Amino acid sequence: MAEEIKDRNMEDRHSISRSLWYLYIGFFITSLIIIGRIIYIQFFWEPDERFEHYFVSSVSERIVEPKRGSVMDCNGKLLATSKPSFDVYMDCAVRKEYYRDLAKKDSARDTLETRWRKDARLLADGLADILSDRGKSADQYYRLIINGRDKDVRYASIVKDIDLFTLSKLKALPIFNRGDQYHSGMIVREKGKRETPYGSLAARTIGYVAIDEDNYTKNRYIGIDGEFDHILHGKEGKEWVRQTDKGEITHVDSSSIAVQDGADIRTTLDIDIQDIADKALRKHIGTQEDIESGCVIVMDVETGAVKAMVNLYRNKENEFREIFNMAIGRPGEPGSVFKSVTLMNLIEDGHVKLETQLPTNGGVTPYFSNKFGKDEYILKYERNTKKKKISVIDGFEISSNYVFRKLIYDYYGDNPKSYIDRLYEYGMHDYLDFDLKERGMGSPSVPNPDKPGWGATDLGSTAIGYTVSVTPLHIVNFYNALANKGKMMKPYIIDSFEKDGKTIEKFEPEVMQGSICSKATADTMTRALMSVVKEGTASKLKTAKCSVAGKTGTARVVLDESERKGSRNPYESIDGKKRHQGTFVGYFPAEDPKYTAIVVVYSRLTKKNFYGGDIPAYTLKDIVDALYTLDPEWSREMKAGKYIPDMEKPYIGVNKKEYVPVPDVMGYGLKDALYAIENNGYKCRYEGVGHVVSQTPEGGAEADKGETITIVLK
Amino acid sequence: MNWATIKRELRDIFKAIGKGELLLHLRVHKLLPYILYGFALACLSIFMSYKAEQTMLTMEKNKLTLDTLRVYHADKTCEIVSLDRISTVEKMLENLESEVQAPEKPANRIKR
């Protein structure tokens, strides 16, 4: 019995151990299968494209681009700012394979593809309608989409550079309104776009940054935007993004780097003055076919802050555009405006007074009759006045080259260096440490008596603004010092760096030369410059709304070899054509100057003559008149309690036309739409909520005043 | 604890597994409040994680809305700023055939 029990126990035990063995084998095989499967999935398996994103890591690194800072004028008005723009592409083959697979299983499903193609027609119609300014027809869009679908094009460019408003309209179109890009096929790429709300105003001075992704040597850094790219750009950030079924979640941990937006730059420019100067220059050079370009600088006398810098260059399409900063980038012989430098030194050194008389000598400079010839202005003076003597002030008024050559040889002929050194003191030879000196500032040059190449005629030429080569900024800076009673300020255009409305770095005005002359000399110079306007070559400014002290200058420009065509005269081509640089520079109101301004125009190669007393003087007159009336600085103060004259209420009429075009309110909110419609004299009826999706009659149509415009909002 | 005791314990555990009485064998019923507490904590943790994720998703959506509004604001700012130009205003007045023009002299101020 005991044996039997023992045998049964042994049998049971064997049975259990067998079961456990099978179980073990089962587990072992299963584990092998699992390991094999893992290896297969890890190294060989490729998931279906449609579901691939479910199998890849849900956490990824994202570089966060900083918001580029804005450039503002002195009153905080936006001159350049960044806002996103969008490029739209289309995956034309979206859901194509899915529809095909469904159609294989169920032939009725083939209608999905047919319906998609029908919707593509509606999409094309909508694109042509919304993007009407891009000049593509609905048929062209349809062909692009359908051909793309047939050829499995996954990235067809639909439109570039659209704003958010247009994008939201596109997203509402058939097919594009089917959700994410895997369903709608709509691929949107956002990019930062530099916007200049004032259009071309000061475009070259504000500048831009153009990055060439393929060749960094072609990167372009222009103007303020280029020079201060390191301030405006900010620093990129890094964060981790986890994909979930319901969207993306941003994770911040110790390895994340917070993005630092760029700082804003407040400039010294005043956009109103810029607009006035731009308009005045366009008005006067726009009608002159032989004018190639022109520039204007307006500077604040007390601080040296640049308030306006206009640069208009005629392009191939015969339009004036801001394409080159001549105000700082085009050095040249300034001509007679340089005579003020000579006169100031003569007066400051006590050599002459304005009333000092000198012989007219038939307009011939002693010892240099062969080199300089006769001064036509002196011959005319002799004829008109029957005098054989001329005062310094008269010579300055008529801008006589003879007078200034004679004076410079008489008083500095033995020691030209004492005169030339002064030019170096005024910074005529360097970049004035201007904020944009690295961005296309031209190299000025002043002759040096100690260096080889100095000739006997150089001193006489320098006295009248030849052999020296300076930019308009150098000239205006010198005149600004005269206006500022001899104190020369450093010209500057950057006022401060700001972040979130707070100033982080402020640039104060700097004195370049405490005194280039005594106050008495500066006052004498102002008297001389005022007489140029009253009696001399700048008489066009006599009728300006406030008194102006200034000087005209007309210089011939040295021609290229190709322009000279073999002529020995560097200023004239073989067929008698020349290039001129006409300048007017001055300050106003002359008695208590607030602004100094320079206008320079450059002619094409032409047989016509251009003078600083014409276009530049007229341009400056317009600027002076506009500034004088707009600036509250010069408001007349009326004492309270005194008689105040009755004023006639002027008639101010708007909307005088019987027919005013129906305003286009598509996309407006209800409030804006009502305002636009009712302000134009129409009544409004509306349905729905949201934004206007249709209007009757259409925008731009003519309708009787008081007619009802029906709008539908969605 | 010697080897024999370990063997006995293991045997008892296997027996208890066979009988489906393992938890009773381990006297887990005495720890039931703690187990329930742990279970509740785990549930709470999952719930909190879920709510946190929901909040973060809402935050992301709000961020997107804010970004969109920021872009819209930038668009409108540029549009409005572009109108704030003397020559643009003059052109608009001209189109409206208005007689309003720039002043011809500075405004008079009344002294206080």
Image (cartoon, grey):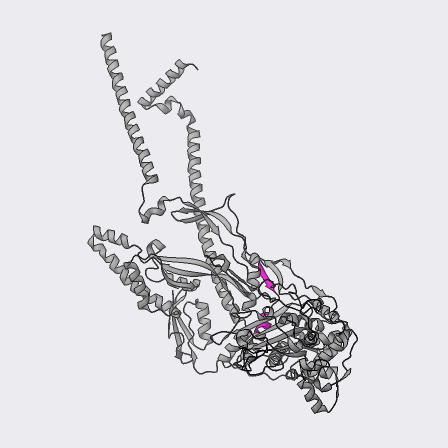
Near-viewer residue (A222 or A505): A222
Near-viewer residue (A112 or A542): A542
Magenta stretch: give its range: A257-276
Image quarter for residue B104? bottom right
**Residue found 50% across the figure and 44% down from its top:** A253
Asked whether, in this view, residue A174 is left or right of residue A235, the answer is left
Asked whether, in this view, residue A483 is left or right of residue A626, the answer is right
Asked whether, in this view, residue A18 is left or right of residue A640, the answer is left
Q: Is residue B20 in the magenta section?
A: no
Near-viewer residue (A637 or A611): A611
Asked whether, in this view, residue A163 is left or right of residue A17, the answer is right
Q: Is residue A166 visible?
A: yes
Whole-percent x, y for residue B99 in the image:
54, 82
Quadrant the C terminus of chain A occupies: bottom left
Examine the rendered structure and indicate whether residue A41 appears above or below residue A272. Answer: above
Q: Is residue A273 in the magenta section?
A: yes
Q: How many marks?
A: 0
Residue extending farthest right: A350
Image quarter for residue A478? bottom right
Near-viewer residue (A532 or A298): A532
Q: Is residue A122 visible?
A: no
Quadrant the N terminus of chain A occupies: top left
Whole-percent x, y for residue A259 in the image:
52, 51
Whole-percent x, y for residue A685 in the image:
40, 72
Image quarter for residue A89? bottom left
Examine the rendered structure and indicate whether residue A87 appears above or below residue A460. Answer: above
Examine the rendered structure and indicate whether residue A540 appears above or below residue A231. Answer: below
Whole-percent x, y for residue A574 in the image:
54, 80
